[in-house]
Image (cartoon, rainbow, N blue to C red):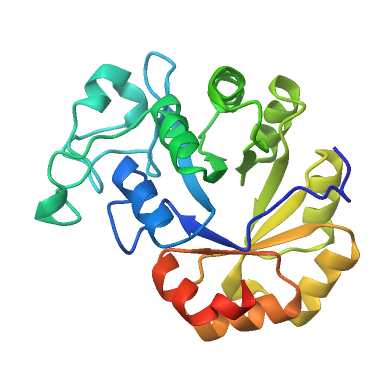
Amino acid sequence: MSVTSTYPLPKLVGHRGAAALAPENTLVGFRAAAAAGVTGVEFDVRLSADGVPVVIHDATLERTTSGKGPVAAQTAATLGALDAGAWFAPRFKGERLPTLEATIGVLRELGLAANIELKSEGDGARALARAVAAVVARAWPADRAPPILSSFDAGCVAACREFAPDVPRAFLVEAPDRKALATARTLDCVAIHANQRRLNQKLTTMVKNDGWRCAAYTVDDPARARRLLAWGVDCVITNAPDRLKAALGDAL
């Protein structure tokens, strides 16, 4: 994958679906993002105890589900029975923790692009990348641009290249620097995803001049989003796609 890839990165992407509108990393959240008018969503994937990629951010279950303990200690069937919506608002009670495969089915229905962030701790990166690659190969529509696989863990990105060499990759960083860009180049990534709080005009220009696509996370203020786009950021990732879509329609 060339660093000069023209991968079609959407300008506005819903963070964990639409995390300000609906429970994060749930099917109802992805539907909320589509209803808000975005064309792509970002979400997180971890492995269950029986090796199934499930869509959840945290390593433990307490914050966003009715479960307790590590995600990796539970089977996919157990995880799928948990309530992943009531914590956000009573009307979402009964919303389930989805698998990656179920999520892809809904994204296919909604016509949404995907940025799949792989979450792994310790030595689990290869197993996670292998499992995600298998689901993407089996379930992602052949007539659509592939998802982008991203991680803060360079080893995980390397495993994605090994198991899904034709699926584009992005390297997640807090602030882009020459070391991060060199790592991303070694891993044949197509984009750098950086913390918007650490971005400025100089860093954005450096990333873009080096040939990368640049995404900024997580941006909920329209004025900040407009500034980032003016600097040359290609993609703004937001919890509030409805707010940014309404405010920045002319710039998207």
Kindly give the residue lying farthest to the top in the view shown. Answer: 50
Counting from the top left corner in percent of width and height, residue 97 is at 29, 34
Q: Nearer the viewer, residue 86 or 126?
A: 86
x then y, percent, for residue 161: 74, 29
Question: Is 161 in front, or is 238?
Answer: 238
**Residue 77 visible within the image:** yes
Q: Residue at x 68, y 38 (%)?
A: 145
**Closer to the camera in the image, 155 or 145:** 145
* Residue under the point 31% across and 22% down: 73
Tell me which corner region of the image, top left, top right, bottom left or bottom right, holds residue 234: bottom right
Q: How many marks?
A: 0
Relative to the observer, which residue lies in front, 145 or 20?
145
Q: Is residue 127 above or below residue 96?
A: above
Q: Is residue 55 left or right of residue 196?
A: left
| Quarter of the C terminus within the rendering | bottom right
Residue 220 visible? The answer is no
The answer to whether residue 145 is left or right of residue 86 is right
Image x and y of residue 150, in percent: 63, 43
Left/right placement of residue 128 relative to residue 161 reads: left
Please report the residue visible at 50 percent of the width from the left and 38 percent of the height from the top. 119
Against 55, residue 49 (above or below) is above
Displayed quadrant of residue 189? top right
Residue 200 to residue 102: above or below = below
Image point 63% across, 73% down: which residue?
Answer: 198
Q: Position of residue 163 (x, y in %)?
A: 69, 20
Q: Would you identify the image quadrant in which residue 69 lies? A: top left
Position of the N terminus, as image quadrant, is top right
Q: Residue furthest left?
A: 90
